Structures are given as structure tokens and as C-alpha cells.
């Protein structure tokens, strides 16, 4: 049965590892929606964001459809390996720094999706 927030991803192969790099507005929205749809999600964060997600083990999204919480893992990025999809969710000015955090894990088999505000990429399959 499709999830009420993301019915379009039902039936797609579920990658074993989805990483959301950058837990701002776009990153938290993606992390929450993807995780509550049954995918395994890890958030790449630093500073206060890392501490908050690590302490709760969850991300939270308040939107017009309700209050959504989802369990996720969190990492600082140095231990990435074997990912299937990495979403780079940052402001354009921070993209270079964020990309350098995950670059060591990128290879020909990983899908990297840039997701800056105002230029979100929507994917239809993995």
C-alpha cells in the first residue's frame, strides 16, 4: 500500500542506504518523508544538528499534512561507504564544502542528487 505522503515511490526497488547530507529545511523534509515511506535513511550532519539527531534518533517534519517523525541514523560523514543514493541538500554557497564531506564515498554505482533550495531535483526511480 502506498504511503500517504509519497505514494509515487511504492513499488520502486528500495536501496539499502540513502544518505541525506545537510539537515536543513530540504534535507529534513526529504529524510522524514523517505524514512516514513520505509527506506533506510542516514543523515550527514555536524554541530548542533548532529547532536540533536543523535540524541533523539529521529527527524521531525511539521507540514500541512501533520506532524511526522521518523527514525534515522546520523553520521558526520567520515564513515560513509556503500551508499546507493546521496542527496546533497545545502544552500548553493555551501555545496562545495558539503560535497567534500561525502566525496570519498562516491563511485560509479552511487546516485548523487543535488537538492539546493529553489532547484530541487525530483527522481522517479533509483
Image (cartoon, rainbow, N blue to C red):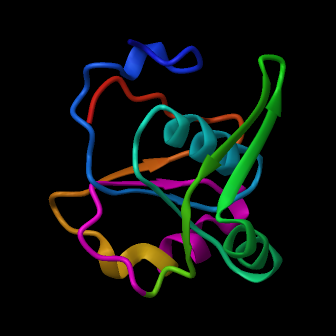
What is the x, y in percent for residue 87?
48, 52
Residue drawn at (54%, 36%) of the image: 36
Residue 116, can we see it?
no
Q: Is residue 104 left or right of residue 32?
A: left
Location of residue 98 with respect to 126 vertically, above or below? below
**In this picture, which residue range is highlighted in magenta?**
79-100
Residue at 76% of width from left, 39% of height from top?
A: 61
Q: Is residue 124 above or below residue 21?
A: above
The quarter of the picture where residue 9 lies is top left
Across and down, in percent, residue 60 comes to 75, 46
What residue do we see at 45% from left, 87% from top? 78
Q: Observer-nearest residue: 86 or 99?
A: 86
Classify the position of the C terminus by image quarter: top left
* Residue 37 screen position, x and y as percent: 47, 31
What residue occupies the far bottom of the structure in this picture? Answer: 78
Q: Nearer the viewer, residue 92 or 22?
A: 22
Residue 55 location, quadrant: bottom right
Q: Is residue 38 above or below residue 82?
A: above
Q: Where residue 49 appears, x then y in whole percent? A: 77, 71
Q: Is residue 82 magenta?
A: yes
Q: Nearer the viewer, residue 98 or 51?
A: 51
Q: Who's the residue at 73% across and 66% down the image? A: 56
Indicate whether residue 84 is drawn in magenta: yes
Q: Quadrant of the N terminus?
A: top left
Amino acid at each position: 500500500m502506498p504511503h500517504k505522503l509519497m505514494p509515487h515511490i511504492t513499488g520502486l526497488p528500495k536501496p539499502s542506504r540513502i544518505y541525506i547530507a545537510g539537515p536543513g529545511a530540504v534535507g529534513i523534509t526529504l529524510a522524514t518523508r523517505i524514512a516514513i515511506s520505509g527506506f533506510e535513511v542516514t543523515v550527514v550532519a555536524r554541530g548542533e544538528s548532529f547532536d540533536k539527531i543523535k540524541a533523539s534518533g529521529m527527524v521531525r517534519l511539521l507540514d500541512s499534512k501533520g506532524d511526522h517523525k521518523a527514525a534515522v541514523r546520523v553520521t558526520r560523514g567520515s564513515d560513509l561507504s556503500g551508499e546507493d543514493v546521496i542527496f546533497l541538500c545545502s544552500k548553493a554557497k555551501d555545496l562545495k564544502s558539503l560535497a567534500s564531506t561525502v566525496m570519498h564515498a562516491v563511485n560509479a554505482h552511487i546516485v548523487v542528487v543535488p537538492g539546493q533550495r529553489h532547484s530541487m531535483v525530483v527522481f522517479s526511480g533509483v
